[in-house]
Image (cartoon, rainbow, N blue to C red):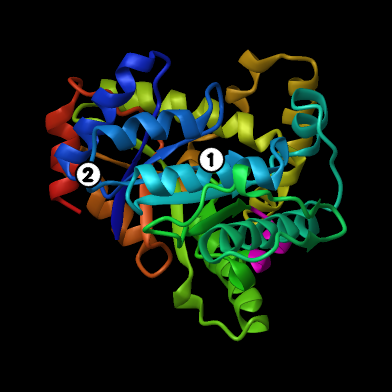
Amino acid sequence: MKFDVVLEADDIHEIKRIASAAESLGFDALWAPETRHDPFLQLALAAECTSDIRLGTAIAVAFARSPMHTAYATWDMARYSQGRFILGLGTQIKPHIERRFAMPWGKPVARLREYILALRHIWDVWQHGGRLNFRGKFYKMTLMSPFFNPGPIEHPHIPIYIAGVNRGLCELAGELCDGFHVHPFHTPEYLRQHIRPWVAAGAAKASRKLDEIEFSATIFVVVGDNDAERAQMRENVRAQISFYASTPTYRPVLEQHGWGELTDRLARLAIRQRWDEMPALISDEMIRVFAVEGTWSEISARVHQRYEGLLDRMTFYAPFIPGQQDANWQRALNNL
């Protein structure tokens, strides 16, 4: 199982330091999320100071950009990273697309399917020539004059991962994608009983095998070498679970364990912006189901044991800050 890490930096000067440290410690990939910062900008800086570590978006919000916009950004990243780039895409949810990005929403699975096909059409035009002529229900692109064509690159195959929780996106991953980003709000049981079978069903539609798709997940961990450290991290995990569990889209994960009604209670608190009251609704039992706990020497092996046969790549839901706990991260890497 590959061991990856998340790039989180508010200071632009920290990005290169984090990327260099992640590569030096031996992480397999560095994933940039799209939360407060643009993931492509961050990874371009990371590409400049690294040579081996894979660089990916986890995720870039597809519907915040046109396929052409994303095609240019990813083509540049494939060039700058010399083939180390992985494009991770996500749909986000309707309120964010309409109210944060001011973009249209509707039929997200069908739209993302067309988005991926459009990207691959554009890349093929740039790499092999030919006319840009993509005509779909959501996107139409027919103009690519030489002045705007970046031309072929040395590493034109850009792996595409998509993220999701429910059946439609899982099947789309199996049909069209190189990998699937399992949402952090998951359990091994949900992954085993729902996500992997759904991805397999999509793969079968396209005459593909399940092992052609990589499964990657960010995993909640309660890690520390003493009770106090683990207690603090446990409360951080409790708060994060309460945030995700308040989203109706993710209710099926809770229903898997008989906790479906909790989504309604948390959603009512979220609507009233009573965020501080939400973590108290997450029990210790829920944390044991959603998170893996252990010391820094134990945690990797415990994650591997829980997810063996389910995942190809793992990332801890924990901040990686060079100069802080480097020895602990090295222990976790060494004991995988």
Crowd around label 2: few <14 · some 14–19 · many ≥20 (10 Å): few
Picture residue at 31% right of the left edge, 18% below the top:
14
Q: In the rendered image, which residue does mark 1 sit on?
A: 73
SS for tag 2? loop
Magenta span covers which residues? 165-172
The reply to whether residue 318 is visible in this rendering is: no
Q: Which mark is residue 40?
A: none
- Check residue 166 for magenta coloring: yes
Expressed as whole percent of the image width and height from the top left, the position of residue 28 reads: 27, 50
Which of the pair 156/116 is nearer the observer? 156
Picture residue at 86% right of the left edge, 47% below the top:
106
Which of the pair 131/229 is nearer the observer? 131
Q: Which mark is residue 51?
A: 2
Q: Is residue 189 above or below residue 245?
A: below
Q: Quadrant of residue 70?
A: top right
Mark 2: amino acid: Ser
Which of the pair 268/152 is nearer the observer? 152
Expressed as whole percent of the image width and height from the top left, the position of residue 206 reads: 64, 81
Expressed as whole percent of the image width and height from the top left, the position of residue 273 reads: 73, 14
Q: Quadrant of the C terminus?
A: bottom left
Q: Is residue 184 above or below residue 121?
A: above
The reply to whether residue 155 is visible in this rendering is: yes
> On the rendered structure, is 139 left or right of 217?
right
- The secondary structure that most of the magenta stretch takes on is helix
